[in-house]
Amino acid sequence: MATTLENQNESTNENPVEDDSAELILVDRFPEALRVSRYTFFTVCILALAFLLFSSMPLWHTDIWGHLAYGKLIWETGSIPDFEPLVPLSSGIPFIDTAWLSQVFGFQSYQLFGVAGIKFLYAAAITMCMGLLLYRAQKRTDSFLWGLICVTGFLLCDWKQLGIVRPQLAGLLCFVLLFTVLNARKWRSSYWFLITGLFVLWANLHGSFPVGLGLIGCFLVGRALDVGRKSGSWKAMFRDTVTRRYFLLLELSAIAVLVNPYGLQLYTEVFAFSANANLSELIEWNPLTLRMYQGKAAALLGLLIVIACRLTPRRISTAEVLILVGLGTAALWSSRMIIWWAPVAAYYLAIHGAAIWGHKLKRWTEQNEEDEVHYAGKWSVVSVGVIWICFAITPIGSEILHGKQVDYEKSVSGSTPIGAVNYLKEKKIEGQLFNSMELGDYLVWEGPAQASVFVNSHVHLLPQEVWNHYLRIINLGSDGDELLERYGVNTIVLDLPRRNNLLRLLERDGEWRVGYKDGRSVVLLRNKPIQ
């Protein structure tokens, strides 16, 4: 009996200690406000890897260098020039810089961190677009999977556009942010200030702000038509609170755009730019076709949307139709416009796809309900760890944390004419050059100051006659030699292998000799320079 009582006492004394220990071990003492779910951790992993991927991509050799040159000029002079300042053949052409703030910000980043700073801005802009789309799609579908599908569709369709570093990415970020706010389940009073401020910023970052105004306009017209059709009275749309909200928001946004160095003139410039005849010769401004990668990607995404809309149990709003058709038509007219259609199309595909498979997703959600809503400090810790590791191995992270400078040649695209520019500097080449348009921006940025670039990517600022002469020379026109002589060109810089035919023609001509050549570019010198 005594033995039994002793055993019971030992058992009684031991159990509380075990319970206390178990309780101490199992309780998550991480601050509740800082706990996240495992799906947040998965999101962090995806975005961190995306940031790492885009940080490792080489800087394309075209637009970015010209924009940095404009940013440098604006920063050093403290003002935006009234006339085109970088291409002498465009002197006297009025210069309305719709991306001045992006250019200055980019130049300052380059000043501080070199190419690592530009890579950071580039990767951050795309990653934030992905994060916004993932967040909004996940909120509307209650599914991490469909949020991931949304982001994947966006990347696949816009991959070609996203590969070029230019201020347009700042405009894309503004567009995606506006789109995600307009698609929120509940309108918040803070959105008035957010959207108005966004348009003030957008109007100075990039000239694509009319796309944002058009987006609000689609929500306005779509809501008005839905209300009128549902109520059976077109007068009802004027009494609808949401319709009036969109109308007021559109007015405020249009006024906010006027906070820029040019005022109302900015609107005129943006629409005049899109109608510029010089742009018609650029591939990226040509109509979208199935011969292009992005044409094939857009066709696949469009087909999936049509199927999803045919099968979806979810109501399709008029605004959705207006946005998809409007931006889709713009993309067919000009392939560069696909950058705005892709995120919208990917989002609506995810929304309707989730609705089609709603019952299956609901059962899966119910089975894993506890896991989805469970927040734990461990996920917060590992999320921060992933962010830190990925940042540390990016170019800017290596420079800030370890003082390790990035390899310049490996950080730029293989088509960047580094060797050709070094040769021009070494030989102190001066006077009017003739160059491939694609190399003009880098020549403006890194080329010798005494040499004049023929054309850069800002072809809309070039007089139409000069642009037509450029096309006749670059496309092997019969009067090419005469035009080169007319402009007093003694040095030609061409990109290879794209311009091999022109190179062979000039070599056979006997007037030119190769001064420098590598796999990227070639420099031709006139045998008897024009004085």
Image: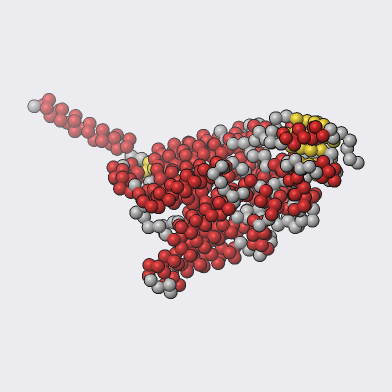
Indicate the quadrant where residue 273 lies: bottom right
Q: Residue furthest bottom?
A: 235
Q: Nearer the viewer, residue 212 or 245?
A: 212
Q: Mark yes or no: residue 480 visible.
A: yes
Q: Residue at x 44, y 70 (%)?
A: 237
Q: Answer above or below: position of 508 versus 367.
A: above
Q: Mark yes or no: residue 170 visible.
A: no
Q: Answer above or below: position of 172 versus 412.
A: below
Q: How is the image coloured?
A: secondary structure
Q: Which image quadrant: the C terminus?
A: top right
The x and y percentages for residue 309 are 40, 52
The x and y percentages for residue 504 are 76, 32
Side of 407 relative to 82 (left or right): left
Q: Which image quadrant: the N terminus?
A: top left
Side of 285 relative to 431 (left or right): left
Side of 329 relative to 183 (left or right): right
Q: Nearer the viewer, residue 519 or 202?
A: 519
Side of 21 relative to 228 (left or right): left
Q: Residue furthest top?
A: 3
The x and y percentages for residue 162 are 57, 43
Q: Residue at x 31, y 43 (%)?
A: 364
Q: Residue at x 59, y 65 (%)?
A: 255
The x and y percentages for residue 334 are 59, 51
Q: Answer above or below: position of 369 versus 463.
A: above
Q: Residue at x 40, y 45 (%)?
A: 146
Q: Residue furthest left?
A: 1
